[in-house]
């Protein structure tokens, strides 16, 4: 992907977040970019191709943090805290109307992105569970696959609910309760000692 294409994707992404996907036509996108519609079509076949490129790039931007976190020299608890912190930041950028447009007007793309996102989160959660067991920080008798699926289910449910407001979802209180609720269910005795000794340090990074 060349630099011009990346610039188009980023500018159109901002338009979609501001006005929604359905209402932004190819003419609108070209006008906003200061280029002709013909030039825009040299980069993308049609609007669906553009929407796909924007959402795939957004997916990469959102979930590349998982690779970065896994590349650090952290134990499983520290790693999980960083993941929860980044997910909390993602809530602040969440746009329900944009998701609605994708679900309604591009159902195939919506399903594909959902599966990609779900697999990435599941693999990350499963790796973290196994890492924590090997480090003696998580309870060894837990079924890692089931816990990883529950983790993904909980995250997806938070993004797609009408019980909590956006302010509640991104509050420190919500972050604290979700994280502590999850972690106390999986920690071994050694893991709990480490967690309780370091939680104030974790909170200081929020």
Image: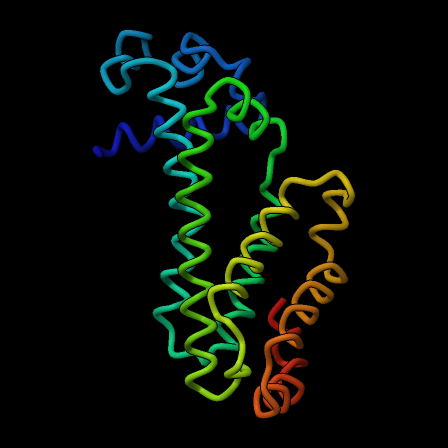
Left/right placement of residue 46 relative to residue 203 reads left
Where is residue 54? Give x, y as percent: 40, 30
Q: How many marks?
A: 0
Residue at 31% of width from left, 33% of height from top? 6
In this view, 159 is above or below 154: above
Residue at 76% of width from left, 62% of height from top? 173
Where is residue 153? Give x, y as percent: 58, 52
Instruction: Locate residue 122: give its quadrant.
Output: bottom left
Where is residue 181? Give x, y as percent: 70, 69
Where is residue 7? Give x, y as percent: 34, 31
**Observer-nearest residue: 65 or 118?**
118
Instruction: Locate residue 161: give its quadrant.
Output: top right
Residue at 62% of width from left, 54% of height from top? 154
Residue at 69% of width from left, 71% of height from top? 180
Instruction: Locate residue 172: give its quadrant.
Output: bottom right
Quadrant position of the C terminus in the picture: bottom right
Left/right placement of residue 45 relative to residue 132 reads left
Quadrant position of the N terminus in the picture: top left
In this view, 176 is above or below 169: below
**Observer-nearest residue: 86 or 119?**
119
In this view, 79 is above or below 37: below
């Amino acid at each position: 992907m060349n630099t011009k294409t990346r610039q188009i994707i980023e500018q159109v992404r901002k338009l979609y977040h501001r006005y929604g996907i359905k209402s932004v036509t190819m003419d609108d996108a070209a006008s906003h970019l200061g280029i002709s519609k013909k030039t825009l079509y040299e980069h993308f076949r049609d609007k669906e191709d553009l929407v796909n490129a924007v959402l795939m790039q957004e997916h990469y931007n959102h979930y590349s943090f998982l690779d970065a976190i896994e590349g650090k020299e952290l134990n499983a608890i520290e790693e999980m805290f960083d993941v929860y912190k980044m997910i909390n930041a993602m809530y602040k950028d969440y746009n329900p109307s944009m998701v609605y447009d994708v679900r309604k007007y591009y159902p195939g793309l919506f399903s594909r992105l959902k599966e990609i996102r779900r697999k990435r989160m599941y693999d990350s959660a499963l790796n973290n569970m196994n890492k924590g067991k090997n480090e003696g920080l998580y309870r060894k008798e837990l079924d890692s696959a089931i816990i990883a699926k529950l983790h993904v289910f909980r995250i997806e449910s938070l993004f797609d609910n009408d019980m909590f407001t956006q302010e509640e979802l991104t509050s420190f209180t919500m972050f604290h309760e979700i994280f502590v609720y999850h972690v106390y269910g999986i920690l071994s005795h050694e893991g709990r000692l480490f967690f309780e000794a370091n939680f104030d340090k974790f909170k200081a990074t929020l």
